Image (tube, rainbow, N blue to C red):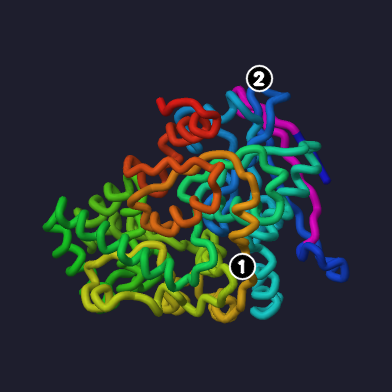
Amino acid sequence: MSVTTRRMQDLTVDDHTITVPLVWNEPADARTIEVHASVISREGGADLPYLVYLQGGPGFEAPRAFHSSTDPYWLDYALAHHRVVMIDQRGTGKSTPVSDADLDRGASAVAEYLTHLRADSIVRDCEAMREHLGASTWSVLGQSFGGFTTLAYLTTDAASLEHVYLTGGLSAVGRHPDDVYALTYDKMRTESLRYYRRFPEHRDAVRRLVDLAHAGRIVLPDGEVVSVSRLRSIGMLLGTNDGWQTVWSLLDQDPATNAFRHDLAHALPFSARNPLYYVFHESSYADGHATRWSAERVEPDDFRADPTLLTGEHVHRDWLDTVPGLQPWQDVTLQLAEFEWPRLYDADALQASGAKGAAAVYVNDAYVPFEFSMETAALLPGVTPWVTSEHEHNGLRSGDVLVRLIDLAHGRRLR
C-alpha cells in the first residue's frame, strides 16, 4: 500500500493505494489489482467522519479534488461535515485501469476479467479501503451507478454504513433488464416530444440529419461514419438538467461544417475514452440475468418507425462496427452480452438492513425509471425519498441536492 499527501487550493488530499484480490472470496485465484482513493479534507476537518463518493457509470473514475464553482459542485458543502473519499472504482482511473492494451491478452481472457469489476466487487474494495483508513463505519454518497453499488453494499455490509445518500441511484431490484429498458424508452419518448414542442423546427433538422447518416455522409474527425442509431443517441443529453442546450446548439448548426462534426463527436455518449461504459453498461441492470442486447430487443415499434424519437442510455450492437474506438472491443462485448450475471441485490436483506439516509428520486429520470426507484425505496423505510421534478438525472451537480438529503437524513426541514 502507499500513501502520499498533496495540496489543492485550500484542500488537503491524501492519496491511498491498496492491493486487493481481483476475485474476492477465491483464495486459489492469486490475481490482484490496485484500488486508489483520494481522501479530501479542508483545514480543521482532519478528524471529521468519512463520506465515500461512489461515481456514476459504470466505468468512470471519481472526480478530482476541486470545489467551490467547479465540478463536483457538492464537494464544498460535504467538506463542512466530512472527509470525502473519492474512490476510483476498479478498472478506472488509478485503480488498475482497463485500457485497449489489455486486449492483447485475448477477448476471452479480457471478458472473464471484466466479470470481476461489478458492483459486488466494488463493495469489497470499499470495505478494504474503509478498514485501511481505520474507520469503523462511514457514510456513502452514491450517484446513479454509484447508488446501485450502494444497494449492493446494503445487501451485504449494511453495518458498515452510517448514512446513505442516493441521487438517481435507486435501481430496480429483482427485475429483468428488459423491464428497465422498456420503461426508459417511454421516458425518452416523453423527453423527445417535450423538446420538439419547444423547438418544432428541430424535428425537421433531425430528419435531415437522419437522411445524411443513412447515406453515410456524417463523418466525425476520428473517421467514424455516424450510423442512424448513433446519431439518435444524442437524446441522452435530454436526461440532464441543461443537456437540451447542447442538443439545440447542434441542431442549429450546418452539418457540413467542421464545427458540427467536432461538436457532435464531443456530444455523443459512450465514447472510447472509457470503453467500459459501453462494453459493460447493460450489466449494471443485470440482477441475475444475461443482457443479450436488452435495449435493442425491447425497442418499441414507434421508435423503429420514427427515427426522430431520440434515444438515451441505450447501447447498440452496430456501434461495434461503426465506432473506431469500440471496434477493438467487439469480441469482448459480444461475450459479455451472453454472460449470466449473478444476483446483486437481496430484497429481504435490504429490508433488514436498517439503512438510514435519504434518496433523491427524479420524477423525469430518463436513465433510472421513477417507478422502479419507488419500488426499491419501499424496501428501505429508513431512507427518506425526496421526490422531485426540479432536477434531471444529474441533479447532484446543482449543488443543493446533497444539502437537502443531509437535512432529510438528520430530520431537519428542507431549506
Label 1 and label 2: CA atoms lie apart by 40 Å
Q: What element carries label 1?
A: helix
The relative height of residue 61 versus residue 412 in the rendered view (above or below) is: below
Q: Is residue 366 left or right of residue 325?
A: left
Along the line of sight, the residue nearer the viewer: 298 or 220:
298
User: Residue drawn at (59%, 60%), measured in percent from left and top?
Assistant: 347
The residue that mark 1 highlights is 100
Check disc 2 and give the amino acid type.
Glu
User: Looking at this rendering, what residue extends furthest in the left direction?
Assistant: 201
User: Residue drawn at (80%, 43%), measured in percent from left and top?
Assistant: 131
Q: Where residue 119 sits in the image (x, y, percent)? A: 63, 59
Q: Which of marks 1 and 2 is nearer the N terminus?
A: 2
The residue that mark 2 highlights is 43
Magenta residues (range): 5-21
Q: In this view, does 277 lie to the left or right of 120?
A: left
Q: Does the magenta stretch include residue 33?
A: no
Which image quarter: residue 189?
Answer: bottom left
Along the line of sight, the residue nearer the viewer: 301 or 360:
360
Residue 67 visible, this angle: no
Q: What element carries label 2?
A: loop
Mark 1 neighbour class, 10 Å CA radius: few under 14, some 14 to 19, many 20 or more: some
Q: In this view, does 156 lie to the left or right of 146?
A: right
Which image quarter: residue 53?
Answer: top right
Q: Could you tell me which quadrant the C terminus lies in?
A: top left
